[in-house]
Image (spheres, rainbow, N blue to C red):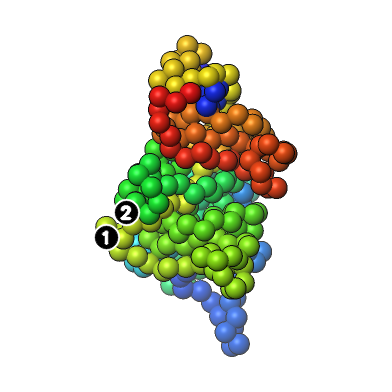
Amino acid sequence: MMIWTTVLGLAASCFTWTTAMYHDKKGHRNLQYLIEPPVYAEVLGRREGNATLPCVMQSKPPHYKVKWTKVQPNQQGVENIVLITNGRDQKHYGAVGPRASLRKAHSLDASLQLTGLGLEDDGTYRCELINGLDDESVTITLRIEGVVFPYQSRHGRYKLTFTQAKDACAEQDATLATFKQLYQAWTEGLDWCNAGWLSDGTVHYPILHPRPACGQDLLPGIRSYGPKHKSKDHFDAFCFTSTSSGSVFFLAGPFTFAEAEQGCRQEGAELAQVGQLYSAWRFAGLDRCDGGWLKDGSVRFPITIPREGCGGLPEPGVRSFGFTNKSKR
């Protein structure tokens, strides 16, 4: 198996490898052919796993097509088609299409199956029945289970344009988080005073414990700067990552950055990315009190069981020493 490696200071952490619809006289939706899914219907998946998005017909018109699309927020008129079928033949589109198929568990089943889930598959999908006259649709949310982490440039706070923030997350085995992902992380305890880019070009920061310079006397919540100029404005980033097929492991040092790289290579691995460390902390319960090198030159350590002398904070998390001199052990 391919292996990544993370070397943590004095040590090393290595990583191994919607649409027209029927309404009644009161204005309520009344579908004739599709069955409305439960309110807030959501399917949970993990990266590299599989998921099925339900869409079931209660009856079939004589001639029809079913079209699955991925809905792009804040992009009216943009339609990312995944799959179109007439009940016999299927045509696949885009990056998701080759990994998509209909479940066909029974004659009325138009549910979409996705394999090899990636971070970018997170979002809202529309199942649309088209019969040339009275089209109907239902929507389902696919949520990739993961973790959001704040990320800052090695050059300091608020140094990233939108594109640089997007690239920085990608370099750390992550994507820019969506607002829904940031909100979920906030409900799970994310409290961060620095503002960061999200995938839609807006800038926010989550606060659970208001304090001077962090919302002051305002109630807890997600502070918003709204949309910002993608090339002129500079902030940090909120990145989102999920599970991985590899694993992070620890090498005892002490190491300089170069020695840490070499130590991981000797183990058939490479220094871990920040997203991989967060994934190992969140999904594998990695807990080490020793700070160590990561691939981006930062020094961090994951704490699952908070205790005295291991970060000083009562909550679990990944502690950071920031970017330090690479010659330091």
Label 2 to label 1, Cα distance in Å?
7 Å
> Callout 1 environment at 10 Å: few (<14), some (14 to 19), or many (20+)?
few
Q: Position of residue 200 (x, y in %)?
A: 40, 60
- Local SS, label 2: loop
Q: Which residue is mark 1?
A: 232
**Seen in the image, is 34 located left or right of residue 168?**
right
**Residue at the image position 47 percent from the left and 51 percent from the top:** 238
Residue 31, by quadrant, is: bottom right
User: Along the horizontal axis of the image, is 24 left or right of 5?
Assistant: right
Q: Does residue 136 sit above or below 23 in this rendering? A: above
The amino acid type found where label 2 is placed reads: Thr
Across and down, in percent, residue 247 comes to 57, 26
Q: Name which quarter of the figure residue 211 lies in.
A: bottom right
Which of 134 and 257 lies nearest the eye of the viewer? 257
The answer to whether residue 107 is visible is no
Q: Which residue is mark 2?
A: 161
Q: Are marks 2 and 1 in contact (CB under 8 Å)?
A: yes
**Can residue 39 be seen from the camera position used here?**
yes
User: Toward the viewer: 257 or 267?
Assistant: 257
Q: Quick one: 295 or 290, which is closer to the camera? A: 290
Which residue corresponds to the image point at 34% horizontal and 62% vertical from the top-left? 78
| Disc 1 element | loop
Q: Which residue, as the protein is rendered here, is positioned at the far left?
A: 232
